[in-house]
Image (cartoon, rainbow, N blue to C red):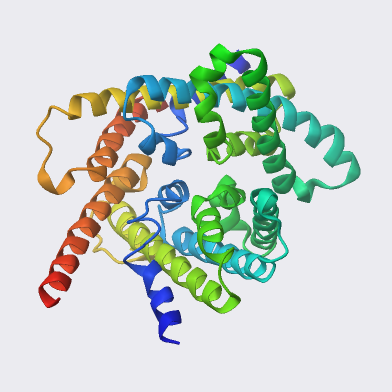
């Protein structure tokens, strides 16, 4: 149980896919102009990651090593198609505003990376905890980035106006260049945080 | 005129990297020197056009008549992956010079999201075959342009004093942000 908890924790800060490993960046910047999109993308991504890891971990002994990559791609593509169709049917507005980025989950390096490095070698339980940890790590960063961008760029959070009426929204933050800027500062902050944490860990040892 | 508009919009106004955040992994990872980024840019251009030429007919002449359009994601990713393999084999055997120049970039291209995105968008926007090819060329040259720009900026950065808290990757995103601001100027170009 303890090792499962440790696996789960890894993805949230120490091996955060976006801020530490810096993979899967495209969607992180493109859909985070408001909180609803950021949350939707985070959940969609977690769903695909969870089920791909479960299926691949279950079949890891059957899949021949030499053709494993195409098989992984087919499994991931199947779950991505499901998400795409469900989103189109039940959340048409969300699906429209995220556009091509939902089908692009299939080439998201986070999923391929975790499946190859973790699920193809581990039992089902650790794979489930790994995917939930990574998914949560991805989702909280998405929500954090989109909250900053929406609050400064639109004066609201998840569509609810928060800033006083006299606040003039800085449009820059919801436009593409603002995404680059906010993300750059987030990485800088995370590097500082990790440095601090390593230092205290060293002092304790 | 319509074709020129599609081309300019894809190349500058909606630049694939700076305005639409596609293909960021290679944009950040492969711009250490200009030669490398040019090689990657041309390899992507080549594969994008080829992938468009292959997926457009498959979608319109195979998937639509058979009512299998929901398999789009699965089919396109497999077509692109096998196409890249074929190109690699062909170049290795018949054009070794070109293979030496861009062969190492080819395996990386399968997971380049710009290529997959272009093939999806050609379908979503309802482009004809010619329009699709023009769009693919525009997008991938836009990618090449962004790669060269960032590689140039990084070259200068090696000798400039970067604030300590931005050293490493953060400054690349700040620089891209500024490049993006410059590219927003193009949005007045097309009404």
Drawn side of residue B124 relative to residue A174, left or right: right
Image: B31 above or below A23: above
Q: In terms of depth relative to the viewer, which is nearer, B53 or A94?
A: B53
Drawn side of residue A101 relative to residue A17, left or right: right
Residue lying at 64% horizontally and 56% vertically, measured from the top left = A76
Image: B187 above or below A161: above
Image: A169 above or below B65: below
> Residue lying farthest right?
B66
Asked if residue B91 can be seen in this view, the reply is yes
Quarter location, residue A136:
bottom left
Residue lying at 90% horizontally and 43% vertically, measured from the top left = B66
Residue B145: image x %, image y %? 41, 22
Residue lying at 18% horizontally and 66% vertically, measured from the top left = A198
Residue B29: image x %, image y %? 38, 37
Drawn side of residue A34 relative to residue B172, left or right: right
Residue B150: image x %, image y %? 32, 28
Residue lying at 67% horizontally and 29% vertically, measured from the top left = B51
Quarter location, residue B98:
top right
């Amino acid at each position: 149980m303890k090792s499962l908890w440790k696996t789960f924790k890894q993805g949230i800060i120490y091996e955060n896919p976006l801020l530490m490993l810096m993979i899967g960046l495209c969607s992180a910047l493109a859909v985070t102009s408001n909180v609803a999109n950021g949350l939707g993308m985070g959940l969609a991504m977690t769903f695909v990651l969870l089920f791909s890891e479960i299926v691949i971990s279950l079949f890891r002994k059957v899949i021949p090593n030499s053709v494993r990559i195409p098989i992984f791609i087919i499994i991931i593509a199947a779950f991505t198609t499901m998400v795409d169709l469900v989103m189109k049917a039940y959340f048409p507005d969300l699906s429209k505003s995220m556009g091509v980025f939902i089908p692009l989950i299939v080439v998201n390096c986070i999923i391929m990376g975790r499946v190859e490095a973790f699920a193809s070698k581990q039992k089902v339980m650790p794979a489930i905890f790994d995917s939930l940890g990574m998914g949560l790590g991805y989702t909280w960063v998405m929500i954090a980035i989109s909250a900053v961008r929406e609050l400064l760029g639109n004066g609201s959070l998840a569509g609810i106006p928060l800033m006083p009426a006299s606040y003039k929204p800085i449009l820059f933050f919801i436009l593409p260049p603002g995404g680059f800027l906010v993300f750059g500062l987030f990485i800088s902050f995370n590097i500082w945080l990790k440095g601090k944490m390593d230092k205290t860990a060293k002092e304790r040892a | 005129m319509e074709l020129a508009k599609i081309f300019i919009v894809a190349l500058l106004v909606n630049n694939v990297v700076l305005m639409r955040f596609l293909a960021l992994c290679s944009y950040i990872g492969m711009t250490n020197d200009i030669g490398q980024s040019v090689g990657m840019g041309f390899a992507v251009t080549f594969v994008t056009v080829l992938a468009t030429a292959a997926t457009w007919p498959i979608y319109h002449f195979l998937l639509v008549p058979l009512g299998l359009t929901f398999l789009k994601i699965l089919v396109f990713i497999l077509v692109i992956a096998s196409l890249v393999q074929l190109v690699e084999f062909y170049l290795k055997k018949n054009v070794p010079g070109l293979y030496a120049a861009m062969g190492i970039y080819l395996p990386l291209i399968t997971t380049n999201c710009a290529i997959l995105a272009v093939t999806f968008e050609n379908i979503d926007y309802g482009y004809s075959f010619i329009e699709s090819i023009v769009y693919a060329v525009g997008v991938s040259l836009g990618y090449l342009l962004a790669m060269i720009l960032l590689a140039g900026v990084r070259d200068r950065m090696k000798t400039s004093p970067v604030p300590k808290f931005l050293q490493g990757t953060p400054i690349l995103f700040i620089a891209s942000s500024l490049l993006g601001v410059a590219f927003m100027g193009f949005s007045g170009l097309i009404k």
